Amino acid sequence: MNIPTKEECYALLEKYKAPISIVDHVTAVAKVGRQLAEAFVAKGQDVNVEAVEAACLLHDVLKCVDFNNYNNFNEEEQAFYQDLIEKFGKGHPEAAEKMLTEEGYPEIGLIVRSHGLESIGEANGPISTAQKIVFYADKRAKYATIPLEKRFSEWKKKYSEKDDSRDTEYWAEKEKLTIALEEDLFEQLDISPGDLK
Ligand SMILES: [Fe+2]
């Protein structure tokens, strides 16, 4: 498996012009992902810590294809993001998989592609342990490690203020499925959700 080093991950984030807020977010997610991967290794499970960490660092590398507007970016950046949309399409998890495959990291792309909240409970949701870890770590960290409940309540608040098609039922269903995923992960480990730093 070809795994980019941390330096190579940050170089890709720079190459694809991930904004600083995304870089801060993926750094926080990688911290959670690494702890979980190490906890699985401690239980003798075959989880690749470096691959999980790289997938966490790269999961939102193409978030730019899904931004609601591009008002905060200069013309050059807007044109760059537009090119990425034309090349890889919208839907940042799948776009990142395509890009990472092209960059020579297909296995990391495979881990990344199921991290979107919309995918859980669907055919394209997380299946492998590495996919589950990256999905879950993303739901436990914004810019620092927080409980699932807090991350969901922030999303619900943010999107209720916007004109967003996702209703209360959608959020309740996704939260329920994510809690079930948390239980699935932690019943295999000697640590609890509250132990993650
Ligand atoms: Fe994320």
Image (tube, grey):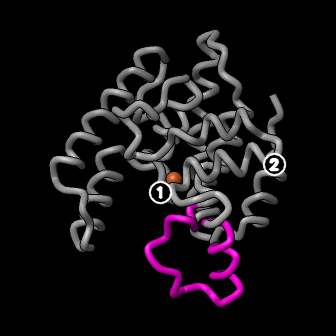
Q: Residue at x 44, y 73 (%)?
A: 68
Query: In front: 92, or 184?
Result: 92
The three-letter code of the residue at mark 1 reads Lys
Q: Magenta-highlighted stretch: main secondary structure?
A: helix
Label 2 SS: loop
Q: Earlier in the sequence, mark 2 or mark 1?
A: 2
Q: Secondary structure at mark 1?
A: loop
Is 59 displayed left or right of 7 in the figure? left
Q: Is residue 111 above or below residue 41?
A: below
Q: Residue at x 71, y 70 (%)?
A: 17
Picture residue at 30% right of the left edge, 33% below the top: 177
Is the residue marked by circle 2 packed among few (<14), some (14-19), or many (20+) residues within 10 Å?
few
Magenta stretch bounds:
63-85
Location of residue 139 in the rendering, given as x and y in whole percent from the top left corner? 43, 46
State the residue position of label 1.
142
Residue type for callout 2: Glu
Residue wearing tag 2? 103
Marks 2/1: CA–CA distance: 27 Å
**In this rendering, would 135 be left or right of 37?**
left
